[in-house]
Amino acid sequence: MDRYDNLILEIIKKHKEESIDREKIRLRKLEKTFWKAVETDGELSIGQGRIGERITNLYLNGLIENKNGYGLTRKGRAQLQFVHPAM
């Protein structure tokens, strides 16, 4: 996992916290938010972005779930705590 995978987890978490009815984020909004966050990042190339592949790997590793939108699993929330212990 790299910082861009963690960024996806953070986007999912932030969306759920800020959503009025705590709804899960849809793929379109997740992709849009991801690319807005990294568009000024000169280190990320288009090939490195591969957001679909990143989301798939996070899903296969059990960090996110897709039930009427994307949400974090217990393992995904633990990963964020590991990256940002003060949160």
Image: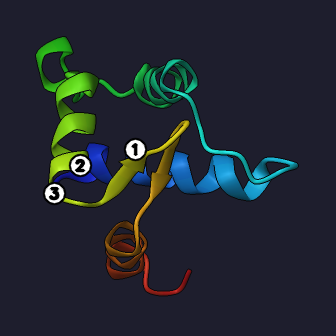
Q: Are marks 2 and 1 in contact (CB under 8 Å)?
A: yes
Q: Are marks 3 and 2 in contact (CB under 8 Å)?
A: yes
Q: What crowding class fits label 3: few (fewer than 14 Cα within 10 Å), some (14-19), or many (20 or more)?
A: few
Q: What crowding class fits label 1: few (fewer than 14 Cα within 10 Å), some (14-19), or many (20 or more)?
A: many
User: In percent of the image, x 50 and y 52: which residue is there?
Assistant: 71
Looking at the picture, which amino acid does disc 2 mark? Answer: Leu
User: In percent of the image, x 36 and y 66: which residue is there?
Assistant: 76
Gap in angstroms between the C-alphas marked 1 and 3: 14 Å
Find residue 8 and name its label.
1
Q: Pinpoint residue 32: horizontal percent, then vertical percent.
A: 52, 19
Q: Name the residue under label 2.
A: 58
Gap in angstroms between the C-alphas marked 3 and 2: 5 Å
Q: Pinpoint residue 27: horizontal percent, then vertical percent.
A: 47, 25
Q: Pinpoint residue 69: horizontal percent, then vertical percent.
A: 53, 37
Looking at the picture, which amino acid does disc 3 mark? Answer: Asn
User: Which secondary structure, mark 2?
Assistant: helix
Looking at the rendering, in which quadrant would you find the N terminus?
A: bottom left
Q: Mark 3 points at which residue?
A: 61
